[in-house]
Image (cartoon, grey):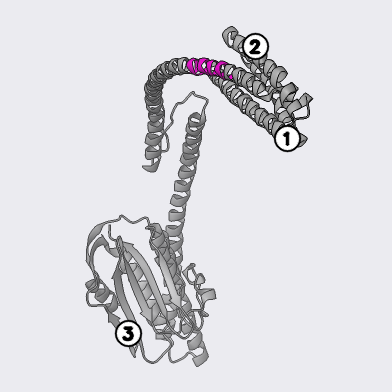
Amino acid sequence: MRENAEFLSISSDVVRESNQFQRNILYMERALKGYMLTGEEYLLQTYHSASIQNNTLLNELTASIHFNSTQLKKINEIKRLYNEWIEQFAKPIMASKPDTSASYQTTLKPQQLLKGEEKINIALQQQFRELLNVEYASREKKRIIMDKNEQKTKVISVILTVFSIVTGFIIAVLLARHISRRISKMVKMSNSIAEGNYKVNVEDKGNDELSELTRSLNRMAEMLEETISLLQRKNKELDQFAYIVSHDLKAPLRGIDNLISWVQEDYANQLPSGVQEYLDLVKGRVTRSENLIQGILTYARVGKEVKEHEEIKLTALIDEILENLPVKQGIHINVQKDMPVIYSEKIPLMQIFTNLISNAIKYHNKEKGEIKVYSKEQKNNYEFFVEDDGPGIASSHQKKIFMIFQTLQDRDSFESTGVGLAIVKKILDDRKEQIKILSEPGKGSVFSFTWSKI
């Protein structure tokens, strides 16, 4: 290919230089004839410029075809004819001052010069035609050879391409199978870890990225096994602690409550009014402590109960909740009539609705008010709302209310454990659901939470 390209480049130069050479002779001839007719010497400038360029072109042509003896002979003949044209036609005209006198016509004999020049010019043109014909013939041969070579190259390229594709496909299949087997082992290991089996291990003695990933998974499984075991042990200890604390604390609290009740019953008429108030205050503190202990136990048990699904008619569920909640004069509770029927866990939903509705009733600070309970069906879940027109909650406190033991009012002025909304948040977090609050002081609150259909 490179040799053919070089040949084509040289041949193009020969053709171009030959044509330029012939054009230059034509320019020189015109300049000389004009000089013969007018005697204006400026016309010879074109002649001299073309003459200089022709000498350069002859040297370039000789250098281009030095390897071709046949063409070189033609170039030498062209040189000879060109020099003869210069000597017999150009130089005589330039040597004498042309005019129209009889002596000029007799001495220079222009007509004879033109006839001789025409014969030389015809010979030059014939040599150039032969030179170019050889070039064009050589080009045609080379073109035929190049076409054949191109055809062969195409065939070889197709064969090599097909071979490369087949080889690449085979390598890709083998590599994919090899990688797939290794990835399958890691997937099985990941699934085992997801199912709670942390005592798994995958062997991979390679030294690539997948091997490093396998070793990382093995280390992760070991760390998870250690962490989960520690966490399970701590949770078990915490459950035991919560049970023991609640049992040990409830007994003396009940004793204190009973003792105060006995004192009030036996010495009701003998106790000063101030002492009676103090005893009532102590009983209130005992009740609060029992409620706190019960709230801690309920909070600790969230997520540990057996998840049993059943058909739940939410309208009936909310009616059941409302029957067990204290009635507050002037507060009307409006429940959506067509609440959905779902297949899910009843106890967690009951805890959520109970806490949200009881809070809406408990914290309502107006003589008359309304609490709305309604739902919206989404693509994959339901969104439930508990809306009230009570005091509202400032944005700075809206995150705080979901933290355990956090209340917005002083417990001495308003009895509350601060556990209810924390239990709601923990139940929803355990099921990867969300709870939101939209509220402004003085404009009421809207609590909404999502619950999956599945």
Secondary element under disc 3, as helix, strand or loop, is: loop
Percent x, y of residue 340 = 23, 69
Q: Does residue 262 appear anywhere in the picture?
A: no
Please tell me which residue is depicted at 75% across the width and 36% down the height of the picture: 40
- The stretch in magenta equals 124-139
Q: Which residue is more in the foreground, 103 or 260?
A: 103
Q: Is residue 358 left or right of residue 45?
A: left
Task: Say which residue appears at 77% left-offset and 34% top-offset.
Answer: 41
**Which secondary structure, mark 1?**
helix
Q: Position of residue 424 (x, y in %)?
A: 40, 67
N-term-proximal mark, 3 vs 1: 1
Q: Quadrant of residue 37?
A: top right
At label 3, the amino acid type is: Val
Judging by the rendered image, the residue that carries numbered circle 2 is: 76
The amino acid type found where label 2 is placed reads Asn
Residue at the disc numbered 3? 327
Where is the C terminus found, in terms of image quarters?
bottom left
- Near-viewer residue (233 or 203): 203
- Residue type (three-letter) at the residue carrying disc 1: Leu
